[in-house]
Amino acid sequence: MPSFNVSCPHCQQNVSLQTTSLSNTVTCPHCSKAVLDGRPVEADSRNFAALIQSPKPIVVTFWGNRCAPCQAFKPVVEQVAQQKKQYRFARVNVNQHPELAKRYRIRGVPTVLVFRKGKQQAALNTALRKPAFLKWLEETLS
C-alpha cells in the first residue's frame, strides 16, 4: 500500500497516511485530532498526487506569501473547512512549490481547484467572501 506524509494541521507533526485511508477519518497519533477533517493540510510535491485521490472531494487553495487577497481568503477557507467536513481541504504555497503551480496552470493567486478521485472538477480564480464561497462549493459539488 502506498503511503505519504502530511503535516497535522493541529500540532504540525508529520503523520504517515495510506492512500486507502483517504475515505476515512484519520486521527493524528501525536495530538489525537482529525488530520484531514476540519482544517486544511499543507500540500507539497511529495503528497499532492496522493491527496487528490481522495474519494471525498478535495478543495485545494493555491496561495502566495505576499498576496493580500490570499491572506484575506485564508480565514474564509479555514471556516468553511470546519463547517464542511464532508470535503477535504488542502493548501499549496506557490512560492515553495512552483512545480505544482506550473503543472496546474496557476496564473494568479488565490486559485481554488476542486478534485474528486484525482480528476479536476472545477476552478475558482479569485477570493470570495464566506457566503459566496459556500454557494460556489455547493454548486460545484452538487
Image (spheres, rainbow, N blue to C red):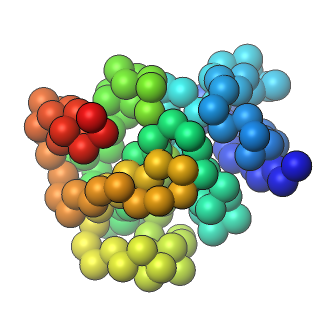
Q: Quadrant of the C terminus?
A: top left
| Horizontal side, residue 127 vs residue 51: left or right | left
Q: Which residue sits at x=40%, y=46%? A: 59
Q: Residue at x 65, y 23 (%)?
A: 25
Residue beneath the point at 29% across and 56% down: 122
The quarter of the displayed image where residue 64 is located: bottom left
User: Relative to residue 17, is residue 77 drawn left or right?
Assistant: left
Query: Does residue 95 show up?
Result: no
Furthest residue to the top? 32
Splitting the image into 4 quarters, where does residue 21 fall?
top right
Determine if residue 64 is in view.
Answer: yes
Q: Is residue 35 shown above or below 70?
A: above
On screen, residue 84 versus residue 39, left or right, reads left
Give the total of numbered labels.
0
Residue 50 percent location from the top left of the image: 66, 55
Q: Position of residue 108 (x, y in %)?
A: 25, 73
Q: Where residue 17 sits: x, y (%)?
A: 78, 41
Q: Residue furthest right?
A: 1
Q: Nearer the viewer, residue 111 or 50?
A: 50
The residue drawn where x is 37% and y is 25% is 84
Asked whether 24 or 68 is in front, the reply is 24
In-front residue for pair 13/5 = 5
Q: Is residue 98 above or below residue 134?
A: below
